Image: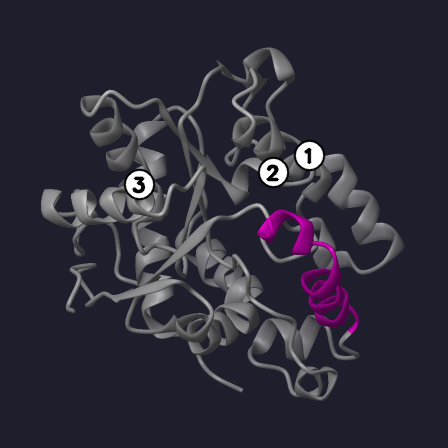
Amino acid sequence: MTSSPQITPPGTGPLPAGYAPAFVAEVLDDALAHDCRVYSITGLQGTGKSTIAAQLVELARERGLHAVALSIDDFYLDHDERVRLGREVHPLLATRGPPGSHDVALACEVVDALRGGRATRLPRFDKIADRRLPRTGWPLVDGVDLVLFEGWFQKVPAQSPAVLSEPVNELERDEDPHGIWRTYCNDSLGSDYDPLWAQLDRLLFLQGPGFDQVPEWRWQQECTLQAANPGRAAMTRPQVMRFVQFFERVSRHAWQVLPGIADRTRRLDASRRPVD
């Protein structure tokens, strides 16, 4: 079992300001060189996937292309559906994040429409309210040339059932002692997501220093979210510490296996700078 590092309070760590223009241009050139319709960016929490996706959309616009950014987070099951899973299968399934907490059918439908250049609405999820926005709040896009699809576990395979027996943190040890929750997530990872991964033309893995960096980066993200929503309450530091434990097992597995799965891997230092 591993222990999580301390998280720096707000204002004491660097917030991601964006990737260097040369690196962003390199990624876009890679997508265009391979005639991608859906270019996927993966990496552990806090690596700056949303940041670079937004930069890529802007750079594509400057080149006369219509690109949109999409996240696996946009496809979380709504709150009530996760509460039902928590009641019927295991209480930890009420918390969004791990495999098994997404509407994969909706994601496949949206990505397929975007691949085909058809008009479609992009789902949006309110992380503070922990609910999917109503369809009337989803932006409508049409004639998209390139989809930048980001998320933290794209194409990660399921683990061997034998690996699940040993808890990786306090959450698994204390709240999933019989392994019901992690087995459900692992089974979902091994069976539910393949149709979605099949729609990804190319995969870039942003490989940070490792999971021990994630709590720090995730706390920075929460501070940024709170600053953008001053009238609403985001997660506290203890809540973030608990939240990252939901991701730890699959994140550590992803960090190990994705270099052998992704089409490209770029290593990042603790300040999110590419080091290759």
Mark 3 and mark 2: Cα distance apart in space: 26 Å
Residue 109 % position (x, y): 67, 32
Instruction: Please name the residue that numbered disc 2 is placed on.
Output: 75
Q: Could you tell me which residue is drawn at 27 percent across and 36 percent down?
A: 56
Instruction: Please name the residue that numbered disc 1 is placed on.
Output: 106
Question: Looking at this view, is 14 or 9 the one in front?
Answer: 14
Quarter placement of the C terminus = bottom left
Residue 170 % position (x, y): 58, 77
The residue range painted magenta reads 180-198
Q: Earlier in the sequence, mark 1 or mark 3?
A: 3
Asked if labels 1 and 2 touch by Cβ distance under 8 angstroms, the answer is yes
* Secondary element at tag 1: helix
Instruction: Please name the residue that numbered disc 3 is placed on.
Output: 32
Which kind of residue does numbered mark 1 sit on? Leu
Among all residues in the image, which is located at the extreme top?
136
Q: For label 2, count other residues whose C-alpha is less than 10 Å away and answer few (under 14), some (14-19) or many (20+).
A: many
Q: Earlier in the sequence, mark 3 or mark 2?
A: 3
Which kind of residue does numbered mark 2 sit on? Phe
Mark 1 and mark 3: Cα distance apart in space: 26 Å
Asked if labels 2 and 3 touch by Cβ distance under 8 angstroms, the answer is no
Residue 88, placed above or below residue 18: below
Among all residues in the image, which is located at the extreme right?
88
Q: How is the image coloured?
A: one colour
Mark 2 and mark 1: Cα distance apart in space: 7 Å
